[in-house]
Amino acid sequence: MQPPLMSASGPDYQPVVTLNGWLPGSYVTIVVGGLLVGFGTRLGSGCTSGHGICGIARLSPRSIVATGVFMVAAIIVVALTHHVFAG
Amino acid sequence: MPILASFLCGFVFGGGLVTSGMTQPAKVLGFLDLFGIPSGTWDPSLAVVMAAGLTVASIGYTLIRRRPPLFARESLWPTKTEIDQPLLFGALLFGVGWGLIGLCPGPAVANLATLSLPVAIFVIAMALGMLAHDLWLALPAPRSLAGKAAADG
Protein backbone atom coordinates (compact mmCIF):
# COMPACT_ATOMS: atom_id res chain seq x y z
CA MET A 1 0.00 0.00 0.00
CA GLN A 2 1.27 3.45 -0.98
CA PRO A 3 1.63 6.06 1.74
CA PRO A 4 -0.74 9.00 1.16
CA LEU A 5 2.06 11.48 0.52
CA MET A 6 3.24 9.54 -2.54
CA SER A 7 0.05 10.31 -4.43
CA ALA A 8 0.95 13.99 -4.40
CA SER A 9 4.19 13.34 -6.27
CA GLY A 10 2.64 11.25 -9.03
CA PRO A 11 2.96 12.15 -12.70
CA ASP A 12 -0.12 14.43 -12.65
CA TYR A 13 1.09 16.55 -9.77
CA GLN A 14 2.63 19.92 -10.49
CA PRO A 15 3.63 22.37 -7.79
CA VAL A 16 1.63 25.59 -7.92
CA VAL A 17 4.21 28.33 -8.35
CA THR A 18 2.44 31.39 -9.65
CA LEU A 19 4.97 33.96 -8.51
CA ASN A 20 8.57 33.10 -9.34
CA GLY A 21 9.92 36.32 -10.86
CA TRP A 22 10.93 34.69 -14.14
CA LEU A 23 10.24 36.66 -17.33
CA PRO A 24 10.20 35.17 -20.85
CA GLY A 25 12.62 37.40 -22.73
CA SER A 26 16.02 39.09 -22.85
CA TYR A 27 16.68 42.29 -20.93
CA VAL A 28 16.22 44.25 -24.16
CA THR A 29 12.76 42.72 -24.66
CA ILE A 30 11.92 43.36 -21.00
CA VAL A 31 12.85 47.06 -21.25
CA VAL A 32 11.06 47.55 -24.60
CA GLY A 33 8.00 45.69 -23.28
CA GLY A 34 7.97 47.74 -20.07
CA LEU A 35 8.26 51.05 -21.93
CA LEU A 36 5.41 50.08 -24.29
CA VAL A 37 3.18 48.91 -21.43
CA GLY A 38 3.83 52.12 -19.46
CA PHE A 39 3.40 54.55 -22.35
CA GLY A 40 0.48 52.63 -23.86
CA THR A 41 -1.56 52.32 -20.67
CA ARG A 42 -1.16 56.07 -20.00
CA LEU A 43 -2.01 57.08 -23.56
CA GLY A 44 -4.91 54.62 -23.77
CA SER A 45 -6.15 55.46 -20.22
CA GLY A 46 -6.18 51.86 -19.01
CA CYS A 47 -4.90 48.28 -18.96
CA THR A 48 -6.27 44.76 -18.56
CA SER A 49 -7.69 45.63 -15.15
CA GLY A 50 -8.83 49.18 -15.95
CA HIS A 51 -10.41 48.60 -19.36
CA GLY A 52 -10.74 44.80 -19.39
CA ILE A 53 -12.44 44.37 -16.03
CA CYS A 54 -13.58 47.74 -14.62
CA GLY A 55 -14.46 49.36 -17.96
CA ILE A 56 -16.24 46.41 -19.52
CA ALA A 57 -18.08 45.78 -16.23
CA ARG A 58 -19.48 49.33 -16.61
CA LEU A 59 -20.27 48.53 -20.28
CA SER A 60 -18.08 51.44 -21.39
CA PRO A 61 -17.76 51.48 -25.21
CA ARG A 62 -14.25 52.97 -24.94
CA SER A 63 -13.12 50.10 -22.73
CA ILE A 64 -14.73 47.43 -24.90
CA VAL A 65 -12.90 48.83 -27.96
CA ALA A 66 -9.58 49.25 -26.09
CA THR A 67 -9.74 45.68 -24.74
CA GLY A 68 -10.39 44.35 -28.24
CA VAL A 69 -7.44 46.33 -29.61
CA PHE A 70 -4.89 45.28 -26.97
CA MET A 71 -6.02 41.63 -27.00
CA VAL A 72 -5.68 41.42 -30.79
CA ALA A 73 -2.33 43.26 -30.72
CA ALA A 74 -0.95 40.93 -28.03
CA ILE A 75 -2.22 37.82 -29.85
CA ILE A 76 -0.52 38.97 -33.07
CA VAL A 77 2.76 39.73 -31.24
CA VAL A 78 2.75 36.29 -29.57
CA ALA A 79 2.04 34.61 -32.92
CA LEU A 80 4.93 36.54 -34.54
CA THR A 81 7.48 36.05 -31.76
CA HIS A 82 6.66 32.42 -30.94
CA HIS A 83 5.85 31.01 -34.38
CA VAL A 84 6.64 33.20 -37.38
CA PHE A 85 10.02 34.45 -36.14
CA ALA A 86 10.65 31.71 -33.55
CA GLY A 87 14.37 31.06 -33.36
CA MET B 1 -10.03 54.09 7.39
CA PRO B 2 -9.43 55.01 3.73
CA ILE B 3 -5.87 53.71 4.07
CA LEU B 4 -7.10 50.45 5.57
CA ALA B 5 -9.69 50.14 2.79
CA SER B 6 -6.99 50.76 0.16
CA PHE B 7 -4.79 48.15 1.79
CA LEU B 8 -7.60 45.58 1.83
CA CYS B 9 -8.50 46.28 -1.81
CA GLY B 10 -4.86 45.92 -2.87
CA PHE B 11 -4.55 42.76 -0.81
CA VAL B 12 -7.60 41.16 -2.46
CA PHE B 13 -6.54 42.35 -5.94
CA GLY B 14 -2.98 41.05 -5.56
CA GLY B 15 -4.20 37.79 -4.07
CA GLY B 16 -6.57 37.32 -7.00
CA LEU B 17 -3.83 38.01 -9.55
CA VAL B 18 -1.44 35.53 -7.94
CA THR B 19 -4.11 32.84 -7.39
CA SER B 20 -5.47 33.07 -10.93
CA GLY B 21 -2.05 32.85 -12.59
CA MET B 22 -2.11 36.35 -14.10
CA THR B 23 1.30 36.95 -12.51
CA GLN B 24 2.83 34.11 -14.55
CA PRO B 25 3.99 35.58 -17.87
CA ALA B 26 4.36 32.10 -19.37
CA LYS B 27 0.73 31.32 -18.56
CA VAL B 28 -0.46 34.64 -19.99
CA LEU B 29 1.47 34.04 -23.21
CA GLY B 30 0.03 30.49 -23.32
CA PHE B 31 -3.42 32.07 -23.25
CA LEU B 32 -2.58 34.63 -25.95
CA ASP B 33 -0.99 31.96 -28.18
CA LEU B 34 -3.87 31.00 -30.46
CA PHE B 35 -1.52 28.73 -32.45
CA GLY B 36 -1.87 26.51 -29.40
CA ILE B 37 -5.50 25.73 -30.30
CA PRO B 38 -4.66 23.38 -33.21
CA SER B 39 -1.64 21.97 -31.39
CA GLY B 40 -3.59 21.40 -28.17
CA THR B 41 -1.31 23.53 -25.95
CA TRP B 42 -3.66 26.54 -25.66
CA ASP B 43 -4.43 27.50 -22.06
CA PRO B 44 -7.96 29.01 -21.99
CA SER B 45 -8.11 29.28 -18.18
CA LEU B 46 -7.45 33.04 -18.11
CA ALA B 47 -10.70 33.56 -20.06
CA VAL B 48 -12.42 32.09 -17.00
CA VAL B 49 -10.53 34.57 -14.81
CA MET B 50 -11.78 37.43 -16.97
CA ALA B 51 -15.36 36.13 -16.99
CA ALA B 52 -15.36 35.68 -13.21
CA GLY B 53 -13.71 39.08 -12.67
CA LEU B 54 -16.30 40.75 -14.90
CA THR B 55 -19.16 39.06 -13.04
CA VAL B 56 -17.94 40.26 -9.64
CA ALA B 57 -17.08 43.76 -10.93
CA SER B 58 -20.49 44.13 -12.63
CA ILE B 59 -22.29 43.28 -9.40
CA GLY B 60 -20.03 45.66 -7.49
CA TYR B 61 -20.64 48.54 -9.89
CA THR B 62 -24.38 47.94 -9.80
CA LEU B 63 -24.31 48.17 -6.01
CA ILE B 64 -22.14 51.29 -5.70
CA ARG B 65 -24.05 53.21 -8.40
CA ARG B 66 -26.94 53.53 -5.95
CA ARG B 67 -25.05 54.98 -3.01
CA PRO B 68 -22.10 57.25 -2.21
CA PRO B 69 -18.79 55.57 -1.37
CA LEU B 70 -18.01 54.72 2.26
CA PHE B 71 -14.59 56.38 2.49
CA ALA B 72 -14.69 59.20 -0.10
CA ARG B 73 -16.89 62.22 -0.75
CA GLU B 74 -18.03 61.02 -4.17
CA SER B 75 -17.38 58.39 -6.81
CA LEU B 76 -15.20 59.65 -9.65
CA TRP B 77 -16.65 57.99 -12.74
CA PRO B 78 -14.76 58.26 -16.03
CA THR B 79 -16.31 60.99 -18.17
CA LYS B 80 -14.79 60.39 -21.61
CA THR B 81 -17.07 58.67 -24.10
CA GLU B 82 -15.36 59.34 -27.43
CA ILE B 83 -13.36 56.53 -29.04
CA ASP B 84 -10.40 58.70 -30.04
CA GLN B 85 -6.91 58.23 -31.45
CA PRO B 86 -5.08 58.23 -28.08
CA LEU B 87 -7.32 55.40 -26.84
CA LEU B 88 -6.74 53.25 -29.92
CA PHE B 89 -3.02 53.97 -30.28
CA GLY B 90 -2.41 53.54 -26.54
CA ALA B 91 -4.24 50.22 -26.46
CA LEU B 92 -2.20 49.10 -29.48
CA LEU B 93 1.13 49.97 -27.83
CA PHE B 94 0.08 48.35 -24.57
CA GLY B 95 -1.01 45.19 -26.41
CA VAL B 96 2.37 44.92 -28.16
CA GLY B 97 4.23 45.29 -24.84
CA TRP B 98 1.92 42.79 -23.13
CA GLY B 99 2.47 40.27 -25.92
CA LEU B 100 6.26 40.68 -25.71
CA ILE B 101 6.62 39.82 -22.00
CA GLY B 102 3.20 38.71 -20.74
CA LEU B 103 3.03 41.23 -17.90
CA CYS B 104 0.49 44.02 -17.54
CA PRO B 105 0.80 46.74 -14.86
CA GLY B 106 -1.08 45.08 -11.97
CA PRO B 107 0.66 41.68 -12.16
CA ALA B 108 4.00 43.44 -12.78
CA VAL B 109 3.69 45.30 -9.47
CA ALA B 110 2.47 42.13 -7.69
CA ASN B 111 5.53 40.32 -9.11
CA LEU B 112 7.81 42.81 -7.35
CA ALA B 113 7.21 40.69 -4.26
CA THR B 114 9.63 38.12 -5.72
CA LEU B 115 12.46 40.71 -5.60
CA SER B 116 13.43 39.48 -9.06
CA LEU B 117 15.81 41.71 -11.02
CA PRO B 118 14.04 41.21 -14.40
CA VAL B 119 10.71 42.19 -12.83
CA ALA B 120 12.24 45.26 -11.17
CA ILE B 121 13.70 46.32 -14.54
CA PHE B 122 10.31 45.79 -16.22
CA VAL B 123 8.53 47.93 -13.60
CA ILE B 124 11.17 50.70 -13.87
CA ALA B 125 10.83 50.68 -17.67
CA MET B 126 7.04 50.80 -17.26
CA ALA B 127 7.29 53.81 -14.93
CA LEU B 128 9.65 55.52 -17.40
CA GLY B 129 7.14 54.85 -20.19
CA MET B 130 4.40 56.52 -18.15
CA LEU B 131 6.71 59.42 -17.34
CA ALA B 132 7.67 59.76 -21.02
CA HIS B 133 3.98 59.98 -21.92
CA ASP B 134 3.33 62.70 -19.37
CA LEU B 135 6.41 64.68 -20.48
CA TRP B 136 5.32 64.31 -24.11
CA LEU B 137 1.86 65.63 -23.24
CA ALA B 138 3.41 68.61 -21.45
CA LEU B 139 5.32 69.63 -24.58
CA PRO B 140 4.01 72.85 -26.08
CA ALA B 141 4.71 71.70 -29.67
CA PRO B 142 1.78 70.60 -31.88
CA ARG B 143 1.05 66.90 -31.57
CA SER B 144 0.03 64.58 -34.32
CA LEU B 145 -2.46 62.74 -32.11
CA ALA B 146 -5.74 64.62 -32.02
CA GLY B 147 -7.97 64.98 -28.99
CA LYS B 148 -5.97 66.86 -26.41
CA ALA B 149 -4.63 69.26 -29.04
CA ALA B 150 -8.13 70.07 -30.25
CA ALA B 151 -9.14 71.27 -26.81
CA ASP B 152 -6.40 73.88 -26.90
CA GLY B 153 -8.01 75.53 -29.93
Image (cartoon, coloured by chain):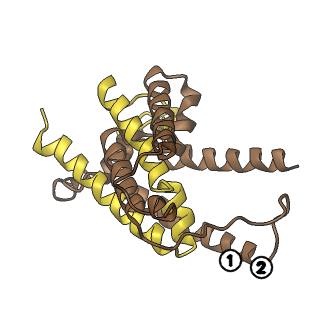
- Horizontal relation, residue B36 to residue A37: left or right: left
Q: Do the CB atoms of the residues marked 2 and 1 lie less than 8 Å apart? A: yes
The tint of chain B in the picture is brown
Depth check: give the residue in front, B111 or B135: B135
Residue A9 image position (x, y, % from top left)? 43, 33
Determine the residue positioned at 53% across, 76% down.
A59
Depth check: give the residue in front, A82 or B18: A82
Residue A22 image position (x, y, % from top left)? 41, 28
Q: Where on the picture, by quarter, is residue A14?
A: top left
Badge 2 density bin: few <14, some 14–19, many ≥20, Cα 10 Å? few
Determine the residue positioned at 55% across, 22% down.
B115
Residue A47 visible to an observer of this rendering? yes
Task: For marks 2 and 1, give the CA distance.
Answer: 7 Å
Residue tagged by mark 2? Answer: B66
Q: Residue furthest top?
A: B117
**Residue B62: mark in rendering:** 1
Amino acid type, residue under disc 2 in the picture: Arg
- Horizontal relation, residue B148 to residue B144: left or right: right
Residue B100 image position (x, y, % from top left)? 30, 40
Instruction: Classify mark 1: helix, strand or loop.
Output: helix
* Chain coloured yellow: A
Amino acid type, residue under disc 1 in the picture: Thr
Q: Which chain carries label 2?
A: B
